[in-house]
Image (cartoon, helix red, strand yellow):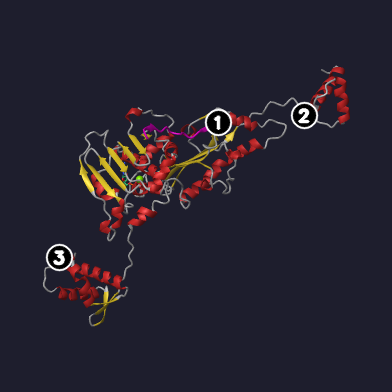
Amino acid sequence: MTWQESAAKAVQRLVSRTGNPLFTRRQLIDSEIKQIIAETASAGETPDQTLSRVLQELRDQGVIKFEASGVYRLLKIVAKAYPRKNFFVQMFTKDISLEDCVLDLIDNSVDGFIKSRHLRLSEVASVFWEKKETKKRTSELPEIHVSLSDTKFEIRDNCGGIDFKDAQNEVFNFGHSTGWTSESLGVYGIGLKRALFKLGNHFEVFSQTTKNGFSCELDVDVWVEKDNSIDDWTFPLKEERAEPSFAKAGTRIRVNRLHDEVKMRMKTGTVESSLRKSISTTFSFFLNRYVKIFVNNQMVEPTPIPTSRPSKGTVSFERFPDDGVEIRILATLAKTGADGRYDQTQTGWYVICNGRAVLTADKGEITGWGISPMPAYHTQYGGFIGLVFFESANPMKMPWTTTKRSLNRESAIYLRTRGKMALAARPVLAFMRSKYSADYDTAPVERELARNTVEATPAQLATAKTVQFEVIKTAPPPNPTTRVQYYALNSDLDKIRKHLNKSRMSAVAIGEHTFNYFLDQEGLK
Ligand SMILES: Nc1ncnc2c1ncn2[C@@H]1O[C@H](COP(=O)(O)OP(=O)(O)OP(=O)(O)O)[C@@H](O)[C@H]1O
Ligand SMILES: [Mg+2]
Protein backbone atom coordinates (compact mmCIF):
# COMPACT_ATOMS: atom_id res chain seq x y z
CA MET A 1 0.00 0.00 0.00
CA THR A 2 1.29 3.48 -0.74
CA TRP A 3 1.86 6.06 1.99
CA GLN A 4 -0.95 8.16 0.61
CA GLU A 5 -3.49 5.32 0.64
CA SER A 6 -2.47 4.21 4.10
CA ALA A 7 -2.48 7.74 5.57
CA ALA A 8 -5.90 8.49 4.01
CA LYS A 9 -7.28 5.33 5.62
CA ALA A 10 -5.67 6.19 8.94
CA VAL A 11 -7.33 9.62 8.91
CA GLN A 12 -10.71 7.99 8.15
CA ARG A 13 -10.20 5.56 11.04
CA LEU A 14 -9.22 8.31 13.46
CA VAL A 15 -12.16 10.55 12.52
CA SER A 16 -14.66 7.70 12.72
CA ARG A 17 -13.28 6.85 16.20
CA THR A 18 -13.52 10.41 17.56
CA GLY A 19 -16.66 11.37 15.63
CA ASN A 20 -14.99 14.75 14.91
CA PRO A 21 -13.73 15.77 11.42
CA LEU A 22 -11.06 17.93 13.12
CA PHE A 23 -7.85 16.09 14.04
CA THR A 24 -4.24 16.90 14.89
CA ARG A 25 -1.01 15.60 13.41
CA ARG A 26 -0.03 14.49 16.92
CA GLN A 27 -3.20 12.37 17.29
CA LEU A 28 -2.49 10.71 13.98
CA ILE A 29 1.09 9.88 14.94
CA ASP A 30 0.13 8.60 18.40
CA SER A 31 -2.65 6.32 17.29
CA GLU A 32 -1.95 5.36 13.66
CA ILE A 33 1.72 5.60 12.76
CA LYS A 34 2.47 1.99 13.69
CA GLN A 35 -0.18 0.66 11.34
CA ILE A 36 0.90 3.03 8.57
CA ILE A 37 4.50 1.81 8.89
CA ALA A 38 3.30 -1.79 8.76
CA GLU A 39 0.98 -1.24 5.78
CA THR A 40 3.59 0.65 3.76
CA ALA A 41 6.42 -1.63 4.87
CA SER A 42 8.46 1.53 5.56
CA ALA A 43 12.02 1.15 6.63
CA GLY A 44 12.80 4.92 6.77
CA GLU A 45 13.89 6.53 10.04
CA THR A 46 11.69 9.62 9.79
CA PRO A 47 8.12 8.42 9.42
CA ASP A 48 6.80 11.57 11.16
CA GLN A 49 8.36 13.71 8.45
CA THR A 50 7.02 11.49 5.67
CA LEU A 51 3.58 11.79 7.25
CA SER A 52 3.77 15.60 7.17
CA ARG A 53 4.63 15.46 3.46
CA VAL A 54 1.78 13.04 2.74
CA LEU A 55 -0.68 15.23 4.66
CA GLN A 56 0.30 18.10 2.38
CA GLU A 57 -0.34 15.91 -0.66
CA LEU A 58 -3.75 14.96 0.73
CA ARG A 59 -4.47 18.66 1.22
CA ASP A 60 -3.52 19.38 -2.43
CA GLN A 61 -5.95 16.69 -3.52
CA GLY A 62 -8.77 18.25 -1.49
CA VAL A 63 -9.05 15.29 0.91
CA ILE A 64 -8.13 17.36 4.00
CA LYS A 65 -7.84 21.04 4.84
CA PHE A 66 -5.35 22.90 7.13
CA GLU A 67 -7.24 24.64 9.91
CA ALA A 68 -4.35 25.85 12.15
CA SER A 69 -0.83 24.75 12.90
CA GLY A 70 -0.90 20.96 13.22
CA VAL A 71 -4.74 20.92 13.02
CA TYR A 72 -6.56 19.50 10.03
CA ARG A 73 -10.15 18.89 8.89
CA LEU A 74 -11.20 15.80 6.95
CA LEU A 75 -13.33 16.89 3.96
CA LYS A 76 -14.15 13.58 2.31
CA ILE A 77 -15.95 11.84 5.13
CA VAL A 78 -17.49 8.44 4.39
CA ALA A 79 -20.09 6.36 6.15
CA LYS A 80 -19.40 2.65 6.44
CA ALA A 81 -21.74 0.53 4.35
CA TYR A 82 -20.29 -2.90 5.00
CA PRO A 83 -22.06 -6.23 4.58
CA ARG A 84 -22.51 -7.90 7.96
CA LYS A 85 -22.21 -11.64 8.35
CA ASN A 86 -24.92 -11.67 10.97
CA PHE A 87 -27.39 -10.26 8.49
CA PHE A 88 -26.74 -12.99 5.96
CA VAL A 89 -26.83 -15.75 8.53
CA GLN A 90 -29.78 -14.62 10.64
CA MET A 91 -32.04 -12.32 8.62
CA PHE A 92 -31.54 -13.33 5.07
CA THR A 93 -32.77 -16.84 5.77
CA LYS A 94 -36.04 -15.76 7.39
CA ASP A 95 -38.15 -15.19 4.28
CA ILE A 96 -37.60 -18.56 2.69
CA SER A 97 -39.07 -21.89 3.68
CA LEU A 98 -37.05 -25.00 4.26
CA GLU A 99 -38.60 -26.66 1.22
CA ASP A 100 -37.77 -23.69 -1.01
CA CYS A 101 -34.14 -23.81 0.13
CA VAL A 102 -33.90 -27.40 -1.01
CA LEU A 103 -35.49 -26.43 -4.34
CA ASP A 104 -32.75 -23.80 -4.67
CA LEU A 105 -30.10 -26.49 -4.22
CA ILE A 106 -31.83 -28.66 -6.81
CA ASP A 107 -31.85 -25.67 -9.21
CA ASN A 108 -28.08 -25.53 -8.82
CA SER A 109 -27.71 -29.23 -9.63
CA VAL A 110 -29.90 -28.78 -12.72
CA ASP A 111 -27.73 -25.79 -13.71
CA GLY A 112 -24.65 -27.97 -13.21
CA PHE A 113 -26.13 -30.55 -15.56
CA ILE A 114 -26.94 -27.91 -18.20
CA LYS A 115 -23.50 -26.33 -17.96
CA SER A 116 -21.50 -29.57 -18.02
CA ARG A 117 -23.44 -30.78 -21.09
CA HIS A 118 -23.06 -27.39 -22.83
CA LEU A 119 -26.82 -27.11 -23.24
CA ARG A 120 -28.74 -23.89 -23.58
CA LEU A 121 -31.43 -23.58 -20.95
CA SER A 122 -33.82 -21.69 -23.21
CA GLU A 123 -33.56 -24.48 -25.78
CA VAL A 124 -33.98 -27.17 -23.13
CA ALA A 125 -37.08 -25.33 -21.89
CA SER A 126 -38.58 -24.96 -25.34
CA VAL A 127 -38.72 -28.78 -25.61
CA PHE A 128 -41.75 -28.39 -23.32
CA TRP A 129 -43.66 -27.28 -26.43
CA GLU A 130 -42.48 -29.99 -28.78
CA LYS A 131 -45.36 -32.12 -29.91
CA LYS A 132 -43.28 -35.25 -30.27
CA GLU A 133 -41.89 -36.55 -26.99
CA THR A 134 -38.27 -37.56 -27.31
CA LYS A 135 -38.03 -40.46 -24.93
CA LYS A 136 -34.73 -40.70 -23.11
CA ARG A 137 -33.46 -43.82 -21.50
CA THR A 138 -33.95 -42.89 -17.87
CA SER A 139 -31.12 -45.19 -16.75
CA GLU A 140 -28.67 -42.74 -18.35
CA LEU A 141 -29.99 -39.63 -16.65
CA PRO A 142 -27.99 -37.92 -13.92
CA GLU A 143 -29.38 -38.23 -10.43
CA ILE A 144 -29.95 -35.79 -7.60
CA HIS A 145 -30.30 -37.40 -4.19
CA VAL A 146 -31.73 -35.48 -1.25
CA SER A 147 -31.50 -37.13 2.16
CA LEU A 148 -32.93 -35.52 5.24
CA SER A 149 -33.42 -36.52 8.80
CA ASP A 150 -33.64 -34.65 12.08
CA THR A 151 -29.85 -34.79 12.43
CA LYS A 152 -28.44 -34.37 8.93
CA PHE A 153 -29.14 -32.98 5.49
CA GLU A 154 -27.40 -34.04 2.31
CA ILE A 155 -27.82 -33.37 -1.39
CA ARG A 156 -25.57 -35.03 -3.92
CA ASP A 157 -25.60 -35.08 -7.68
CA ASN A 158 -23.58 -36.40 -10.59
CA CYS A 159 -24.41 -33.35 -12.67
CA GLY A 160 -20.83 -32.44 -13.57
CA GLY A 161 -19.49 -30.65 -10.50
CA ILE A 162 -18.26 -27.11 -9.78
CA ASP A 163 -15.03 -25.87 -11.33
CA PHE A 164 -12.30 -25.11 -8.76
CA LYS A 165 -11.63 -21.69 -10.25
CA ASP A 166 -15.34 -20.81 -10.08
CA ALA A 167 -15.37 -21.99 -6.48
CA GLN A 168 -12.53 -19.60 -5.64
CA ASN A 169 -13.95 -16.60 -7.43
CA GLU A 170 -17.74 -16.77 -7.77
CA VAL A 171 -19.70 -19.63 -6.19
CA PHE A 172 -19.41 -18.55 -2.55
CA ASN A 173 -19.87 -14.83 -3.13
CA PHE A 174 -23.06 -13.27 -1.83
CA GLY A 175 -24.53 -12.11 -5.13
CA HIS A 176 -22.88 -12.05 -8.53
CA SER A 177 -20.51 -9.34 -9.67
CA THR A 178 -21.77 -6.68 -12.08
CA GLY A 179 -21.86 -7.95 -15.62
CA TRP A 180 -22.09 -11.63 -14.61
CA THR A 181 -24.36 -13.51 -16.99
CA SER A 182 -25.29 -17.12 -17.26
CA GLU A 183 -28.05 -18.96 -19.00
CA SER A 184 -29.23 -20.84 -15.94
CA LEU A 185 -31.99 -21.19 -13.39
CA GLY A 186 -29.65 -19.40 -11.00
CA VAL A 187 -29.68 -15.64 -11.33
CA TYR A 188 -28.98 -13.83 -8.10
CA GLY A 189 -25.99 -15.65 -6.63
CA ILE A 190 -27.50 -16.27 -3.22
CA GLY A 191 -29.43 -19.57 -3.36
CA LEU A 192 -26.60 -21.83 -2.20
CA LYS A 193 -25.44 -19.69 0.72
CA ARG A 194 -28.97 -18.91 1.87
CA ALA A 195 -29.82 -22.63 1.90
CA LEU A 196 -26.65 -23.56 3.81
CA PHE A 197 -27.21 -20.90 6.47
CA LYS A 198 -30.91 -21.72 6.73
CA LEU A 199 -30.24 -25.38 7.38
CA GLY A 200 -27.50 -25.43 9.99
CA ASN A 201 -24.30 -24.31 11.66
CA HIS A 202 -21.78 -26.53 9.97
CA PHE A 203 -21.54 -27.54 6.33
CA GLU A 204 -19.27 -29.37 3.92
CA VAL A 205 -19.22 -28.97 0.14
CA PHE A 206 -17.29 -31.51 -1.90
CA SER A 207 -17.23 -31.20 -5.67
CA GLN A 208 -15.35 -32.81 -8.53
CA THR A 209 -15.33 -32.07 -12.22
CA THR A 210 -13.34 -34.15 -14.69
CA LYS A 211 -10.59 -31.49 -14.52
CA ASN A 212 -10.30 -30.62 -10.82
CA GLY A 213 -11.95 -30.80 -7.43
CA PHE A 214 -12.29 -28.97 -4.13
CA SER A 215 -13.83 -29.23 -0.70
CA CYS A 216 -14.99 -26.58 1.71
CA GLU A 217 -15.87 -27.03 5.34
CA LEU A 218 -17.25 -24.23 7.46
CA ASP A 219 -18.29 -23.76 11.05
CA VAL A 220 -20.74 -20.91 10.54
CA ASP A 221 -20.72 -19.73 14.18
CA VAL A 222 -16.94 -19.32 14.15
CA TRP A 223 -17.00 -17.61 10.74
CA VAL A 224 -19.60 -15.06 11.87
CA GLU A 225 -17.52 -13.96 14.87
CA LYS A 226 -14.72 -12.47 12.77
CA ASP A 227 -16.25 -9.63 10.79
CA ASN A 228 -13.85 -6.66 10.89
CA SER A 229 -13.03 -6.11 7.26
CA ILE A 230 -13.99 -7.38 3.84
CA ASP A 231 -11.00 -9.74 4.02
CA ASP A 232 -12.91 -11.76 6.62
CA TRP A 233 -15.44 -12.67 3.92
CA THR A 234 -13.81 -15.86 2.67
CA PHE A 235 -14.40 -19.60 3.08
CA PRO A 236 -11.43 -21.99 3.33
CA LEU A 237 -11.03 -24.25 0.28
CA LYS A 238 -9.04 -27.43 -0.11
CA GLU A 239 -7.95 -28.80 -3.44
CA GLU A 240 -9.21 -32.33 -4.17
CA ARG A 241 -8.46 -34.70 -7.02
CA ALA A 242 -10.47 -34.62 -10.25
CA GLU A 243 -13.03 -37.32 -11.02
CA PRO A 244 -11.90 -39.17 -14.18
CA SER A 245 -15.39 -40.44 -14.99
CA PHE A 246 -17.73 -37.78 -16.42
CA ALA A 247 -20.74 -39.84 -15.27
CA LYS A 248 -19.55 -39.60 -11.67
CA ALA A 249 -18.39 -35.97 -11.57
CA GLY A 250 -20.65 -33.98 -9.29
CA THR A 251 -21.25 -32.23 -6.00
CA ARG A 252 -22.11 -33.33 -2.47
CA ILE A 253 -23.33 -30.88 0.14
CA ARG A 254 -23.76 -31.90 3.75
CA VAL A 255 -25.17 -29.85 6.59
CA ASN A 256 -24.25 -31.45 9.89
CA ARG A 257 -25.44 -29.35 12.81
CA LEU A 258 -29.02 -28.53 11.87
CA HIS A 259 -30.70 -25.50 13.46
CA ASP A 260 -33.24 -26.29 16.17
CA GLU A 261 -36.20 -25.03 14.11
CA VAL A 262 -35.10 -27.20 11.19
CA LYS A 263 -34.79 -30.22 13.49
CA MET A 264 -38.24 -29.50 14.86
CA ARG A 265 -39.78 -29.31 11.40
CA MET A 266 -38.02 -32.51 10.40
CA LYS A 267 -39.42 -34.22 13.48
CA THR A 268 -43.01 -33.30 12.57
CA GLY A 269 -42.57 -35.63 9.62
CA THR A 270 -44.32 -33.41 7.07
CA VAL A 271 -41.21 -31.96 5.43
CA GLU A 272 -40.43 -35.04 3.39
CA SER A 273 -43.91 -35.29 1.87
CA SER A 274 -44.28 -31.57 1.21
CA LEU A 275 -40.81 -31.50 -0.35
CA ARG A 276 -41.65 -34.45 -2.56
CA LYS A 277 -44.81 -32.63 -3.68
CA SER A 278 -42.97 -29.37 -4.38
CA ILE A 279 -40.26 -31.14 -6.38
CA SER A 280 -42.85 -33.08 -8.33
CA THR A 281 -44.66 -29.91 -9.48
CA THR A 282 -41.74 -27.46 -9.65
CA PHE A 283 -39.49 -29.69 -11.72
CA SER A 284 -42.28 -31.60 -13.46
CA PHE A 285 -40.83 -30.73 -16.86
CA PHE A 286 -37.23 -31.72 -16.01
CA LEU A 287 -38.07 -34.92 -14.10
CA ASN A 288 -37.31 -38.14 -15.95
CA ARG A 289 -36.54 -36.10 -19.07
CA TYR A 290 -33.25 -34.52 -17.96
CA VAL A 291 -32.68 -35.62 -14.37
CA LYS A 292 -34.00 -38.04 -11.78
CA ILE A 293 -34.58 -36.77 -8.27
CA PHE A 294 -34.74 -38.93 -5.16
CA VAL A 295 -35.84 -37.94 -1.66
CA ASN A 296 -34.64 -40.36 0.99
CA ASN A 297 -33.94 -42.93 -1.74
CA GLN A 298 -37.43 -42.77 -3.21
CA MET A 299 -37.72 -41.43 -6.74
CA VAL A 300 -40.00 -38.43 -7.27
CA GLU A 301 -42.43 -38.74 -10.16
CA PRO A 302 -43.50 -35.63 -12.09
CA THR A 303 -47.00 -34.17 -11.69
CA PRO A 304 -48.08 -33.14 -15.18
CA ILE A 305 -50.48 -30.24 -15.68
CA PRO A 306 -53.92 -31.83 -16.21
CA THR A 307 -54.90 -30.02 -19.41
CA SER A 308 -57.59 -31.07 -21.85
CA ARG A 309 -59.53 -29.52 -24.71
CA PRO A 310 -63.19 -29.53 -25.65
CA SER A 311 -63.84 -32.39 -28.07
CA LYS A 312 -65.50 -29.87 -30.39
CA GLY A 313 -63.89 -26.44 -30.22
CA THR A 314 -60.60 -24.74 -29.42
CA VAL A 315 -58.51 -23.63 -26.45
CA SER A 316 -57.14 -20.10 -25.91
CA PHE A 317 -53.51 -19.87 -27.03
CA GLU A 318 -51.22 -16.96 -27.71
CA ARG A 319 -47.45 -16.63 -28.23
CA PHE A 320 -45.60 -13.32 -28.32
CA PRO A 321 -42.19 -11.81 -27.58
CA ASP A 322 -41.80 -9.10 -24.94
CA ASP A 323 -38.44 -7.46 -24.25
CA GLY A 324 -36.26 -10.50 -24.90
CA VAL A 325 -38.69 -13.00 -23.35
CA GLU A 326 -40.81 -15.41 -25.38
CA ILE A 327 -44.21 -15.81 -23.72
CA ARG A 328 -46.90 -18.39 -24.30
CA ILE A 329 -50.35 -18.32 -22.70
CA LEU A 330 -52.74 -21.25 -22.74
CA ALA A 331 -56.21 -21.30 -21.17
CA THR A 332 -58.50 -24.29 -21.31
CA LEU A 333 -60.50 -26.83 -19.35
CA ALA A 334 -58.94 -29.25 -16.91
CA LYS A 335 -58.98 -32.97 -17.34
CA THR A 336 -61.61 -34.59 -15.14
CA GLY A 337 -60.73 -37.50 -12.89
CA ALA A 338 -62.11 -41.03 -13.14
CA ASP A 339 -65.15 -39.88 -11.14
CA GLY A 340 -65.94 -37.18 -13.73
CA ARG A 341 -64.98 -34.39 -11.35
CA TYR A 342 -62.20 -31.81 -11.37
CA ASP A 343 -59.42 -32.09 -8.82
CA GLN A 344 -59.45 -28.50 -7.60
CA THR A 345 -56.04 -28.86 -5.98
CA GLN A 346 -54.65 -29.08 -9.51
CA THR A 347 -56.63 -26.40 -11.33
CA GLY A 348 -55.93 -22.68 -11.65
CA TRP A 349 -52.98 -20.84 -13.19
CA TYR A 350 -49.53 -22.37 -13.70
CA VAL A 351 -46.61 -20.00 -14.23
CA ILE A 352 -43.42 -21.54 -15.61
CA CYS A 353 -40.09 -19.78 -16.15
CA ASN A 354 -37.57 -21.57 -18.38
CA GLY A 355 -39.20 -24.89 -17.54
CA ARG A 356 -39.22 -24.37 -13.75
CA ALA A 357 -42.69 -23.92 -12.24
CA VAL A 358 -42.93 -20.76 -10.16
CA LEU A 359 -46.63 -21.00 -9.30
CA THR A 360 -48.81 -24.07 -9.60
CA ALA A 361 -52.62 -24.27 -9.55
CA ASP A 362 -52.78 -20.67 -8.37
CA LYS A 363 -56.14 -19.15 -7.50
CA GLY A 364 -54.97 -15.88 -5.96
CA GLU A 365 -54.57 -12.25 -6.83
CA ILE A 366 -50.99 -12.71 -8.01
CA THR A 367 -52.26 -14.45 -11.15
CA GLY A 368 -55.02 -11.89 -11.57
CA TRP A 369 -57.98 -13.53 -9.84
CA GLY A 370 -60.20 -10.76 -8.48
CA ILE A 371 -58.43 -8.08 -10.52
CA SER A 372 -60.71 -6.77 -13.25
CA PRO A 373 -61.48 -8.23 -15.78
CA MET A 374 -60.74 -11.56 -14.01
CA PRO A 375 -63.39 -12.52 -11.44
CA ALA A 376 -62.36 -13.63 -7.95
CA TYR A 377 -61.83 -17.36 -7.76
CA HIS A 378 -64.92 -19.40 -7.01
CA THR A 379 -65.48 -23.14 -7.02
CA GLN A 380 -67.56 -22.77 -10.19
CA TYR A 381 -64.21 -22.12 -11.93
CA GLY A 382 -62.83 -25.38 -10.58
CA GLY A 383 -62.32 -26.73 -14.09
CA PHE A 384 -60.11 -23.89 -15.30
CA ILE A 385 -56.51 -24.45 -16.27
CA GLY A 386 -54.24 -21.63 -17.40
CA LEU A 387 -50.57 -21.87 -18.23
CA VAL A 388 -48.08 -19.06 -18.76
CA PHE A 389 -44.62 -19.97 -19.99
CA PHE A 390 -41.72 -17.50 -19.97
CA GLU A 391 -38.66 -18.49 -21.94
CA SER A 392 -35.46 -16.47 -22.23
CA ALA A 393 -31.72 -16.87 -22.60
CA ASN A 394 -31.40 -14.10 -20.02
CA PRO A 395 -32.82 -15.37 -16.71
CA MET A 396 -32.49 -11.85 -15.21
CA LYS A 397 -35.56 -10.99 -17.27
CA MET A 398 -37.73 -13.61 -15.59
CA PRO A 399 -40.51 -12.04 -13.52
CA TRP A 400 -39.89 -14.30 -10.51
CA THR A 401 -39.00 -13.38 -6.92
CA THR A 402 -35.56 -14.31 -5.51
CA THR A 403 -37.07 -17.45 -3.99
CA LYS A 404 -38.50 -18.35 -7.44
CA ARG A 405 -41.73 -19.42 -5.76
CA SER A 406 -43.79 -16.41 -6.70
CA LEU A 407 -43.96 -13.56 -9.16
CA ASN A 408 -42.52 -10.10 -8.86
CA ARG A 409 -45.59 -7.86 -8.75
CA GLU A 410 -43.63 -4.91 -10.17
CA SER A 411 -42.26 -6.71 -13.21
CA ALA A 412 -43.38 -4.78 -16.30
CA ILE A 413 -43.25 -7.93 -18.41
CA TYR A 414 -45.48 -9.74 -15.97
CA LEU A 415 -47.96 -6.89 -15.64
CA ARG A 416 -48.35 -6.76 -19.43
CA THR A 417 -48.70 -10.53 -19.56
CA ARG A 418 -51.32 -10.59 -16.82
CA GLY A 419 -53.63 -8.45 -18.96
CA LYS A 420 -53.31 -10.97 -21.78
CA MET A 421 -53.85 -13.88 -19.36
CA ALA A 422 -57.18 -12.36 -18.33
CA LEU A 423 -58.26 -12.09 -21.97
CA ALA A 424 -57.31 -15.70 -22.67
CA ALA A 425 -59.15 -16.89 -19.56
CA ARG A 426 -62.34 -14.88 -20.18
CA PRO A 427 -64.16 -17.24 -22.60
CA VAL A 428 -63.19 -20.30 -20.52
CA LEU A 429 -64.57 -18.69 -17.34
CA ALA A 430 -67.72 -17.51 -19.14
CA PHE A 431 -68.26 -21.07 -20.29
CA MET A 432 -67.87 -22.36 -16.73
CA ARG A 433 -70.35 -19.78 -15.42
CA SER A 434 -72.91 -20.85 -18.03
CA LYS A 435 -72.71 -24.41 -16.72
CA TYR A 436 -74.22 -23.19 -13.47
CA SER A 437 -76.88 -20.81 -14.75
CA ALA A 438 -78.86 -23.53 -16.45
CA ASP A 439 -82.56 -23.14 -16.81
CA TYR A 440 -84.65 -25.19 -14.39
CA ASP A 441 -86.37 -27.35 -16.98
CA THR A 442 -83.67 -28.00 -19.54
CA ALA A 443 -80.54 -30.05 -18.98
CA PRO A 444 -77.47 -27.74 -18.88
CA VAL A 445 -75.74 -28.53 -22.13
CA GLU A 446 -72.37 -27.20 -20.94
CA ARG A 447 -72.30 -29.65 -18.06
CA GLU A 448 -72.49 -32.39 -20.60
CA LEU A 449 -69.87 -30.71 -22.77
CA ALA A 450 -67.39 -30.35 -19.95
CA ARG A 451 -67.49 -34.08 -19.63
CA ASN A 452 -66.83 -34.30 -23.36
CA THR A 453 -63.26 -33.14 -23.20
CA VAL A 454 -60.24 -34.81 -24.70
CA GLU A 455 -57.04 -35.11 -22.70
CA ALA A 456 -54.18 -33.21 -24.37
CA THR A 457 -50.74 -31.98 -23.28
CA PRO A 458 -49.92 -28.25 -23.46
CA ALA A 459 -47.62 -29.01 -26.41
CA GLN A 460 -50.50 -30.64 -28.28
CA LEU A 461 -52.71 -27.65 -27.53
CA ALA A 462 -50.28 -25.00 -28.79
CA THR A 463 -51.29 -23.47 -32.10
CA ALA A 464 -49.39 -21.45 -34.69
CA LYS A 465 -51.90 -18.60 -34.55
CA THR A 466 -53.59 -16.85 -31.64
CA VAL A 467 -56.91 -18.53 -30.87
CA GLN A 468 -59.67 -17.98 -28.33
CA PHE A 469 -61.37 -20.71 -26.34
CA GLU A 470 -64.63 -21.80 -27.88
CA VAL A 471 -66.92 -24.77 -27.47
CA ILE A 472 -69.03 -25.63 -30.47
CA LYS A 473 -72.41 -26.48 -29.11
CA THR A 474 -74.55 -29.13 -30.70
CA ALA A 475 -78.24 -28.55 -29.99
CA PRO A 476 -79.48 -30.84 -27.21
CA PRO A 477 -82.25 -33.31 -28.16
CA PRO A 478 -85.64 -31.63 -27.58
CA ASN A 479 -87.20 -32.53 -24.25
CA PRO A 480 -90.50 -34.44 -24.96
CA THR A 481 -91.95 -33.81 -21.51
CA THR A 482 -93.30 -30.83 -19.58
CA ARG A 483 -93.72 -30.65 -15.86
CA VAL A 484 -97.43 -30.28 -14.89
CA GLN A 485 -98.22 -28.59 -11.59
CA TYR A 486 -101.52 -27.57 -9.98
CA TYR A 487 -103.17 -27.29 -6.57
CA ALA A 488 -105.83 -29.77 -5.36
CA LEU A 489 -107.87 -29.87 -2.12
CA ASN A 490 -106.38 -32.22 0.46
CA SER A 491 -109.86 -33.59 1.11
CA ASP A 492 -110.16 -34.52 -2.58
CA LEU A 493 -106.74 -36.25 -2.50
CA ASP A 494 -107.87 -38.24 0.57
CA LYS A 495 -111.08 -39.24 -1.23
CA ILE A 496 -109.02 -40.65 -4.11
CA ARG A 497 -106.66 -42.52 -1.73
CA LYS A 498 -109.66 -44.07 0.01
CA HIS A 499 -111.30 -44.95 -3.29
CA LEU A 500 -108.12 -46.63 -4.55
CA ASN A 501 -107.46 -48.19 -1.14
CA LYS A 502 -103.95 -46.70 -1.13
CA SER A 503 -103.76 -44.64 2.05
CA ARG A 504 -100.11 -43.58 1.51
CA MET A 505 -100.31 -42.65 -2.17
CA SER A 506 -98.25 -39.47 -2.87
CA ALA A 507 -99.79 -36.36 -4.42
CA VAL A 508 -97.47 -36.81 -7.43
CA ALA A 509 -98.64 -40.42 -7.90
CA ILE A 510 -102.27 -39.32 -7.64
CA GLY A 511 -101.66 -36.63 -10.25
CA GLU A 512 -100.06 -39.12 -12.67
CA HIS A 513 -102.79 -41.73 -12.00
CA THR A 514 -105.68 -39.36 -12.65
CA PHE A 515 -103.93 -37.92 -15.73
CA ASN A 516 -103.44 -41.40 -17.21
CA TYR A 517 -107.04 -42.33 -16.28
CA PHE A 518 -108.29 -39.46 -18.42
CA LEU A 519 -106.11 -40.49 -21.38
CA ASP A 520 -107.39 -44.09 -21.03
CA GLN A 521 -111.02 -43.13 -20.69
CA GLU A 522 -110.95 -40.85 -23.68
CA GLY A 523 -109.04 -43.36 -25.79
CA LEU A 524 -106.13 -40.97 -26.23
CA LYS A 525 -103.27 -43.33 -25.44
N1 LIG B 1 -24.52 -28.79 -7.39
C1 LIG B 1 -23.97 -27.86 -8.19
N2 LIG B 1 -23.48 -28.19 -9.42
C2 LIG B 1 -22.94 -27.26 -10.22
N3 LIG B 1 -22.86 -25.93 -9.91
C3 LIG B 1 -23.32 -25.55 -8.70
C4 LIG B 1 -23.88 -26.49 -7.77
N4 LIG B 1 -24.23 -25.81 -6.65
C5 LIG B 1 -23.93 -24.51 -6.87
N5 LIG B 1 -23.37 -24.34 -8.10
C6 LIG B 1 -23.00 -23.08 -8.71
O1 LIG B 1 -22.61 -22.17 -7.73
C7 LIG B 1 -23.02 -20.85 -8.06
C8 LIG B 1 -23.67 -20.16 -6.89
O2 LIG B 1 -24.93 -20.74 -6.61
P1 LIG B 1 -26.09 -19.88 -5.96
O3 LIG B 1 -27.30 -20.76 -5.86
O4 LIG B 1 -25.62 -19.24 -4.72
O5 LIG B 1 -26.33 -18.73 -7.03
P2 LIG B 1 -27.04 -18.83 -8.46
O6 LIG B 1 -27.52 -20.20 -8.68
O7 LIG B 1 -26.13 -18.27 -9.48
O8 LIG B 1 -28.25 -17.79 -8.30
P3 LIG B 1 -29.61 -17.94 -7.44
O9 LIG B 1 -29.38 -17.15 -6.20
O10 LIG B 1 -30.62 -17.34 -8.33
O11 LIG B 1 -29.79 -19.38 -7.17
C9 LIG B 1 -23.91 -20.96 -9.29
O12 LIG B 1 -23.21 -20.58 -10.45
C10 LIG B 1 -24.26 -22.41 -9.29
O13 LIG B 1 -24.57 -22.88 -10.56
MG1 LIG C 1 -28.83 -21.15 -7.40
SS type, badge 1:
loop
> Horizontal and vertical percent for residue 362?
51, 42
Pointer 3: residues within 10 angstroms few (<14), some, or many (20+)?
few
User: Is ligand 1 closer than 8 angstroms to the Cβ of mark 1?
Assistant: no
In this view, 434 is above or below 510: below
> Horizontal and vertical percent for residue 208?
25, 40
Q: Can residue 342 be found in the magenta stretch?
A: no
Q: Quadrant of the N terminus?
A: bottom left
Q: Single out the mark in the foreground, 3 or 1.
A: 3
Q: Magenta residues, as a range?
A: 296-310
Q: CA distance from mark 3 to mark 1?
A: 78 Å
Q: Which residue is mark 2?
A: 483
Kindly identify the residue that appears in the image at 63 percent across and 32 percent down.
447
What is the total number of numbered labels drawn onto the structure image? Answer: 3
Determine which quarter of the picture holds residue 226. Answer: bottom left
Q: Quadrant of the C terminus?
A: top right
Q: Which residue is mark 1?
A: 336
Kindly identify the residue that appears in the image at 35 percent across and 53 percent down.
89
SS type, badge 3:
loop
**Amino acid type shown at disc 3:** Ala
Pointer 1: residues within 10 angstroms few (<14), some, or many (20+)?
many
Tell me which secondary structure the magenta stretch mostly adopts: loop
Please indicate, yes or no, whether residue 288 appears anywhere in the rendered image: no
Q: Single out the mark in the foreground, 2 or 3.
A: 3
Kindly identify the residue that appears in the image at 44 percent across and 31 percent down.
131
Asked whether, in this view, residue 378 is left or right of residue 15, the answer is right
Please indicate, yes or no, whether residue 229 appears anywhere in the rendered image: yes
SS type, badge 2:
loop
Earlier sequence position, callout 1 versus callout 2:
1
Quadrant location, ligand no. 2: top left
Numbered label attached to residue 41: 3
